[in-house]
Image (cartoon, coloured by chain):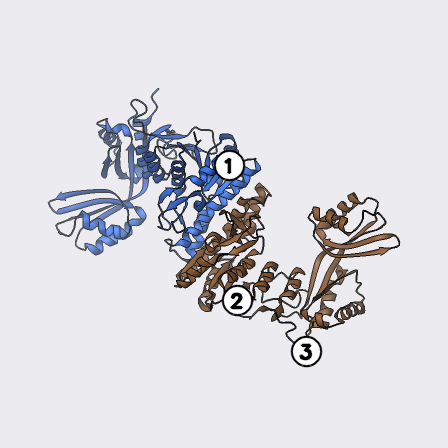
Chain colours: A blue, B brown
């Protein structure tokens, strides 16, 4: 059976010394193929130069530019492996057969033709493959957008028939909550794919979200591990509620939220569709949405990223000059996530009680099958994370 | 008819500001295609990282690494052109069809398949092509070795049927001698290809020597011009002696020479073949060679680069322990170059007279059809350049 595909992120490859360390790991752990990001800081350096000239990034030359960062990592790691007696097969996207659509700067992988990679493995070589990049059918380089190397790694694992993909990064794994906010935070050893999706989109930025979706879809065992420690890391799985009673797997927090309340108004043009298509046109992402009907008319509450708030407000003022509008940007979102919630009633109620006991006001609520999220005043966020972590995640001895 | 191919060197592309300047030049002068080097300093940065890991450079990953520098230049110049309303066709070696052998780090161009470049031109796009790189038949990136972008540009001009190739650099052209040594030095407006080869190999490092050979072979008009000034530059031509009486076109000087004298000895193993095959095995390049037979036996004089001298001496001591050996490394070579010499007798004699009149000792002499070179004490080099420049190159009013 084919061994795992390893993926090393930018911090793991951030210097020549670290690249030598990664080469040692490969020598010891014998992956079947290795996918690499650009050295940390490199993509930022390239993008900064591009932006000095033009902020246009949906053009082939932008993708050609940023793809050069991974090319450097592939080359340097290959040199380090050859020095250790491993014959590397350095590969960029065209050789590795990573086909994408032609949405420059945010391309999607259509297919990984695994034959060149498999042929190299069959010869006893170690394929070292540029992440983050792809190639269009007519031979132009593309890039997958930030964090895309995780997705490359999972797609390559699927393309060559590997069952496991290990993402090496600079943290020990996925934590039950942000350790900077809550000292009790601990590593989740096994997390359900869907929980991971909720955790990722809620601000736990360990893995690129598309890679998690793809791993689930293709049945790849996905592991996050620290390249600088011996911790076993976090494994994504499809098993519901691994440990009896652990209903909640993690507490996710996002700080930079703004809350906007539009209406109430009886203007017939003011409704969910009209409001959010206006915002979508301005490319403003909306998170929580609630709607209510009051005597005064329709009222819509929603949250956006704090730096999008001024544009959102201006947009609504222009489109609906007569409608009342209020907002606050000193808010934060806290969520509890866990596949166990599906079968455990009352988890949401317990969350509300814990927050109420601390006098933490809940401004908005959003729920999914495996998540309950609350918008709260930002100054209470740290306190909320700690009490919810204690309630749902303190280790039972 | 197809317009000229432009080539911009690293200093011409050394910052975002300079790239914008190059884009303006292209907008104004309308080349049919543009070939670029890496931004100045970039190749050195990449090679330094590689050398920290391994000094092995005849491997695919080394070429993949250094090729990334040109990829960045292609991308940034393309962005700057698009901003100006020119549709760029950014191309790396595989797309541009620059086929080489697989001698990694010093590959030779076998062929430029011009069809992709021509197709882009036919659509009204401006091909921006990575210099210095090529691709093997089996799709691996190669690099041509230092200065190879000049060669790329000429080969591309030939491959697409352009008649002219303009090399933009940071000097106004080829000078009659080094202006730092001789204030009277002036730009040669038209220089014969063969003179250029002699000038180039003698230390006038304006153009990569292979590019000059290829331009001569393929009949491409080659021009060197400064991207930062409006000077018309230097044109290479096949016309002998452009101006009546200008027998000598330039004075070339090389400082870092060492002179080695081996023998005399009657050892039958000591002869030109045995001495220079020993040195060739150690990869020591030899420049001037003379041989004489004296009563004491065979004597061989030769010059090498100063930093190769210790190895050359050690090699000869080991191989011919009985043979006398002497050397001095405080020497320099001065040459006068000109196609006019072919038909003008007495040029060498005039050179010797001028040096003798200044009491400059001539240690060795080397001649070709269009060159006379003398090895002289290094401390006399500046004086020698000035008097020879005055003798052969002062402007006649």
Which chain contains the residue that carries disc 3? B
Viewed as shown, does residue A311 lie left or right of B334? left
Of residues B353 and B156, the one nearer the viewer is: B156
Inter-mark Cα distance, 3 to 1: 68 Å
Of residues A340 and A101, the one nearer the viewer is: A101
Quadrant of image for the C terminus of chain B: bottom right
Name the mark nearer the viewer: 3 or 2. 2
Kindly identify the residue that appears in the image at 60 percent across and 58 percent down: B210
Of residues B102 and A342, the one nearer the viewer is: B102
Which chain contains the residue that carries disc 2? B
Q: Is residue A35 visible?
A: no
Name the mark nearer the viewer: 3 or 1. 1
Q: Which residue is mark 3?
A: B396
- Are tags 3 and 2 found on a single chain? yes
- Are tags 2 and 1 found on a single chain? no
Q: Which residue is mark 1?
A: A125
Going by the picture, which residue comes out furthest to the bottom? Answer: B397
Going by the picture, which residue comes out furthest to the right? Answer: B295
Q: Which residue is mark 2?
A: B164
Q: Is residue A165 visible?
A: yes
Tag count: 3
Kindly identify the residue that appears in the image at 38 percent across and 39 percent down: A155
Viewed as shown, does residue A343 lie left or right of B259? left
Inter-mark Cα distance, 3 to 2: 31 Å
Residue A179 picture location, percent across and down: 38, 33
Q: Secondary structure at mark 1?
A: loop
């Amino acid at each position: 059976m084919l061994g795992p595909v390893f993926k090393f992120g930018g911090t793991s490859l951030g210097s020549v010394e670290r690249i030598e360390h990664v080469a040692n790991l490969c020598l010891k752990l014998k992956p079947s193929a290795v996918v690499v990001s650009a050295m940390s800081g490199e993509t930022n350096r390239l993008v900064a130069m591009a932006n000095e000239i033009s902020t246009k990034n949906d053009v082939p030359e932008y993708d050609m530019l940023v793809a050069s960062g991974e090319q450097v990592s592939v080359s340097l790691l290959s040199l380090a492996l050859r020095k250790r007696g491993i014959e590397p097969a350095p590969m960029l996207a065209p050789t590795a057969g990573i086909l994408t659509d032609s949405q420059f700067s945010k391309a999607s992988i259509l297919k990984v033709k695994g034959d060149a990679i498999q042929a190299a493995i069959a010869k006893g070589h170690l394929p070292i493959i540029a992440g983050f990049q792809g190639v269009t059918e007519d031979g132009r380089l593309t890039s997958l957008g930030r964090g895309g190397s995780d997705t490359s790694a999972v797609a390559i694992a699927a393309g060559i028939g590997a069952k496991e993909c290990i993402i090496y990064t600079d943290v020990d794994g996925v934590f039950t909550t942000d350790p900077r906010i809550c000292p009790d935070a601990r590593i989740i050893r096994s997390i359900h794919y869907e929980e991971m999706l909720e955790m990722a989109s809620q601000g736990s930025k360990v893995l690129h979200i598309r890679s998690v979706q793809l791993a689930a879809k293709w049945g790849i065992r996905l592991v996050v591990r620290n390249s600088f420690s011996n911790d076993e890391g976090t494994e994504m799985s499809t098993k519901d509620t691994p440990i009896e009673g652990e209903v909640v797997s993690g507490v996710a927090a996002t700080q930079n939220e703004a809350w906007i309340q539009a209406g109430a108004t009886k203007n017939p043009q003011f409704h969910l569709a009209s409001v959010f298509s206006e915002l979508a046109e301005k490319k403003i992402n909306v998170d929580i949405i609630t709607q209510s009907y009051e005597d005064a008319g329709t009222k819509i509450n929603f949250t956006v990223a704090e730096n999008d708030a001024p544009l959102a407000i201006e947009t609504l003022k222009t489109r609906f000059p007569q409608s009342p509008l209020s907002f606050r940007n000193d808010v934060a979102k806290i969520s509890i996530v866990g596949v166990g919630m599906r079968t455990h009633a009352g988890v949401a109620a317990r969350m509300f009680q814990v927050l109420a006991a601390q006098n933490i006001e809940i401004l908005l609520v959003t729920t999914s099958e495996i998540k309950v999220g609350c918008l709260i005043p930002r100054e209470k966020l740290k306190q909320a994370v700690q009490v919810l972590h204690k309630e749902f995640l303190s280790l039972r001895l």
